[in-house]
Amino acid sequence: MDNRRYIYLDEVDSTNTYAKSLAKPLTDFSDGGQLLIIRAGKQSGGRGRGDKAFFSNHQGGLWASIIAPISDISKHFEHNRAVSLAILESLKKIDSTAPISIKWPNDIYWGGKKVTGVLLENSPENPNVIIIGFGVNVNISNDDLPKDLRERATSVLIETGREQSLDQLLGDIISGYQKYINIDPPAVHKLYSSHLYKKGHAAIVDGHAGTFVIVELDGRIALDTARGRVFCHSGTLQFLPEQE
């Protein structure tokens, strides 16, 4: 990667927080559509949605953020969709038969367990960029995971028994993101929709219970409820126990 567009830190509180500190002086950042990628060996204060703590204080994970140009904040979900597909595709290159799927709005699952979290944030100081953070559990053993995560999180190492090159995986993800962000959105969305986790299952989002039908082109999730179809722009997707 071009060193002018790539920053590596041995340790940082959060690559997204660090990216925000850089976004303000990048007044001409969107010129030419270049990306700035920040990667950390580990994070001391990794965050997920709603500032929830995100496990990332281990050297075996891929903890990174992309600062990317954005023409309009309404295109936020296009970046979410592009990076989600890029991560899924990159993991599939490691194991083509792996049951990898996208859990709306910002997780990647390997089977029934989370392997990646994604966090997109705006930069108030520079509305022309978006910060796309992601953490992939790569060379992390089951013993490395906090005990409270072992039932619901996994890693590439746990699933395949093999360690992977973090640099190679990051390169694949960046290439995939650049590919998908430049493809016609409806075409990308059709592919995204085909990889959704537990589509058709009973679920609840922000108090709305029903059947998870689809994610719309603009990123809204659609649930068929007893009161009709409901659309949610954001929230936590929780799946209900399967009926016998």
Image: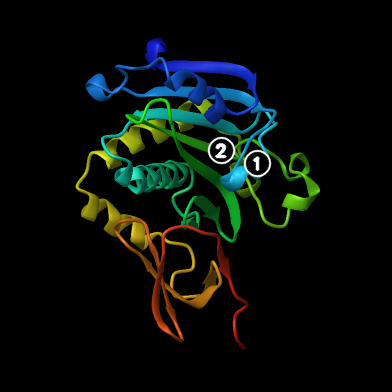
Location of residue 48 in the rendering, given as x and y in whole percent from the top left corner: 59, 43
Residue at 59% over, 52% down:
114
Find numbered disc 2 in the image and state the secondary structure of the residue it sits on.
strand
> Which residue has dot 1 on it?
54
Q: Is residue 129 above or below residue 159?
A: above
Find numbered disc 1 in the image and state the secondary structure of the residue it sits on.
loop
- 14 left or right, relative to 174: right
Task: For residue 160, say whether it is visible.
Answer: no
Q: Is residue 235 above or below residue 208?
A: above
Q: Are marks 1 and 2 in contact (CB under 8 Å)?
A: yes
> In the rendered structure, which disc, 1 or 2, sits on the residue that comes first in sequence?
1
- 158 left or right, relative to 63: right
- Identify which residue, 49 or 153, lies in the foreground: 49
Location of residue 91 in the rendering, given as x and y in whole percent from the top left corner: 47, 44
10 Å crowding of disc 2: few (<14), some (14-19), many (20+): many
Residue at 59% over, 47% down:
50
- Identify which residue, 48 or 27, lies in the foreground: 27
Task: For residue 23, say whether it is visible.
Answer: yes
Looking at the rendered structure, the kind of residue marked 1 is Phe
